[in-house]
Each structure stands twice: as structure tokens, then as C-alpha cells.
């Protein structure tokens, strides 16, 4: 039989963190139940959205996230990518049915004259286009270069996902460029959701991206700057 818990109950740290983050994000408190000596269940419900998070006690005595469900208007839906994504769905459930409604891909404007790009960026752009033409001769993959506040971004966009390579001037070598040390690349899945990192937030697991950061080595032969980035990570 489930045991309904009060605020005074001492909960595992993971459950407490999820309770706090969800309350801060949605303004609503979730219900927590101890469904067995080995399981906790968190339920957060609105008129249209219901989220459940379950934790299981391991043989070592620690608590581990075990399962989650997300339903909208009574129908099961794919789990949210992270807490921010869930908050978006919570506030606007119809976003799930709008094409591109959850997209996080920044809008970029192609540069007017690619000949004015720094040499490294221009060569990388040419190599990326050659790679795209070899993999998708039907033109379904588009590659552009765009100016940004910090430098230049090369975007490779396909139906399966989008890749951004961000270039910035080197600090100690005037006129030289390289991938941004702090944010050199970013991957978005086919829905436009950030898939650069596979992680969990408040026990809400990210779904698997079309390709993961460590698989960027497949491009290393064409992009020496990516190989350096992989070696330093």
C-alpha cells in the first residue's frame, strides 16, 4: 500500500531536489508517495499535464532514478528533454503538436560575402559542404556561415538534426581563429532540441540525440580543430 508523505518526512536527496526544482519551475507542489520500502513516486498534475518520477533503492542503500512518464490530455508523450523543456510543456502543452514548437536552434543569417570570412572559417565551410554533398547529394543538408557577437558560426542543418561549429579569434595570436574553447560546437536533434549533452535534470532524463559529442571524431579527419577539441575534452 502506498504511503502518502508529509512535508516533515525526510526524503532522499534526489527526491527533495526534484520537489524543489519542480515547485520553483511550475509554482505547484508535487505529491510524493512511498509505494514500497524500495520505491518513491513523485506525481505532479495540472488540468492537462501529468508527470511521474520514480526512484528505487539500490542494494547499497542509495537511491537511483528508476522511471518517468509524461502524459498530456491523458495520452502518453515522449519525456521532456530537461527541466526547462518540461516547464515549457507544462505552461503550453500545445507546443508538442506544433512543428518546431520546441526548437532551440538559434536563427542565423548567412554572411553576404563568404570571401571575407577568416581563412580557417572559410576552409571549414568548404570542407563541411563537401562532406554534406557526399552524404546527401539530394540537397537535403544545408551548410551556411553566419556572423555572431563572438565570431562566426557554421551551421549544418539536415532533417535529422543540426550542428553548429562556433569560431572565435584567438586571444594570444592576432588574426588567428579557432573553435571557441568554451562553446565550440552544439548539436540539436530533429526537433531542434539541444542534444549536445546527455544528462538529467531533476530526474527528468534527456532523450538520446542523433549523434553524441564523443562521436564528433568522425569529422576529425576533415576538421583538425575538432580533433584538438576532442583531445582536450
Image: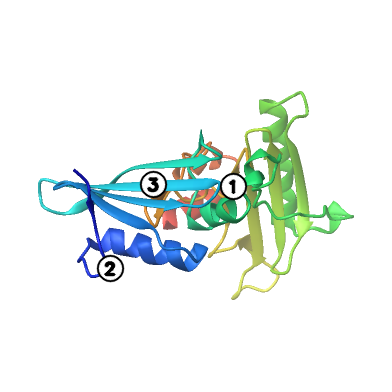
- The reply, left or right, for residue 57 in relation to residue 228 is left
Q: What residue did someone put label 2 on?
A: 7
Q: CA distance from mark 2 to mark 3?
A: 18 Å
Q: What residue did someone put label 1 on?
A: 193
- Packing grade of label 2 (10 A; few <14, some 14-19, many >=20) is few
Q: Secondary structure at mark 2?
A: loop
Query: Marks 2 and 1: which is nearer the front?
Result: 2
* Image quadrant where residue 73 sits: top right
Q: Position of residue 198 (x, y in %)?
A: 43, 48
Q: Residue at x 64, y 50 (%)?
A: 164
Tell me whether the residue at label 2 lies in contact with that at label 1, contact meaning CB atoms closer than 8 angstroms.
Answer: no
- The reply, left or right, for residue 196 in relation to residue 32 is right
Q: Quadrant for the C terminus, please.
A: bottom left
User: Is 214 or 125 nearer to us in this picture?
Assistant: 214
User: Is 33 or 114 nearer to us in this picture?
Assistant: 33
Query: Marks 3 and 1: which is nearer the front?
Result: 3
Q: CA distance from mark 2 to mark 1?
A: 35 Å
Give the answer, above or below, for where 90 lies relative to 222.
Answer: below
Among the two numbered marks 2 and 3 on one chain, the one whose residue lies closer to the N terminus = 2
Q: What residue did someone put label 3 on?
A: 52
Tell me whether the residue at label 2 lies in contact with that at label 3, contact meaning CB atoms closer than 8 angstroms.
Answer: no
User: Is 163 or 79 nearer to us in this picture?
Assistant: 79
Among the two numbered marks 3 and 1 on one chain, the one whose residue lies closer to the N terminus = 3
User: Is 180 or 164 nearer to us in this picture?
Assistant: 164
Q: Position of residue 14 (x, y in %)?
A: 29, 59
Q: Secondary structure at mark 1?
A: loop
Q: Secondary structure at mark 3?
A: strand
Residue 225 visible in the shown view: no
Q: Residue at x 50, y 66 (%)?
A: 27
Q: Position of residue 91 (x, y in %)?
A: 60, 56
Amino acid at each position: 500500500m502506498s504511503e502518502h508523505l508529509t512535508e516533515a518526512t525526510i526524503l532522499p536527496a534526489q527526491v527533495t531536489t526534484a520537489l524543489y526544482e519542480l515547485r520553483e519551475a511550475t509554482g505547484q507542489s508535487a505529491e510524493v508517495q512511498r509505494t514500497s520500502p524500495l520505491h518513491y513516486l513523485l506525481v505532479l498534475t495540472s488540468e492537462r499535464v501529468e508527470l511521474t518520477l520514480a526512484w528505487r533503492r539500490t542494494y547499497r542503500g542509495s537511491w537511483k532514478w528508476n522511471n518517468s512518464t509524461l502524459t498530456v490530455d491523458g495520452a502518453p508523450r515522449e519525456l521532456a528533454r530537461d527541466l526547462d523543456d518540461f516547464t515549457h510543456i507544462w505552461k503550453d502543452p500545445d507546443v508538442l503538436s506544433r512543428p518546431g514548437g520546441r526548437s532551440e536552434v538559434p536563427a542565423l543569417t548567412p554572411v553576404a560575402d563568404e570571401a571575407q570570412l577568416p581563412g580557417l572559417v572559410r576552409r571549414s565551410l568548404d570542407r563541411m559542404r563537401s562532406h554534406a554533398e557526399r552524404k546527401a547529394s539530394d540537397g537535403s543538408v544545408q551548410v551556411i556561415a553566419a556572423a555572431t557577437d563572438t565570431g562566426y558560426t557554421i551551421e549544418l542543418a539536415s532533417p535529422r538534426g543540426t550542428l553548429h561549429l562556433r569560431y572565435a579569434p584567438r586571444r594570444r595570436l592576432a588574426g588567428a581563429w579557432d573553435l571557441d574553447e568554451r562553446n565550440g560546437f552544439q548539436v540539436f536533434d530533429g526537433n531542434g532540441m539541444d542534444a549536445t549533452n546527455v544528462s538529467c535534470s531533476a530526474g527528468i532524463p534527456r532523450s538520446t540525440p542523433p549523434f553524441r559529442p564523443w562521436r564528433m571524431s568522425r569529422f576529425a579527419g576533415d576538421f583538425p580543430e575538432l580533433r584538438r577539441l576532442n583531445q582536450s575534452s
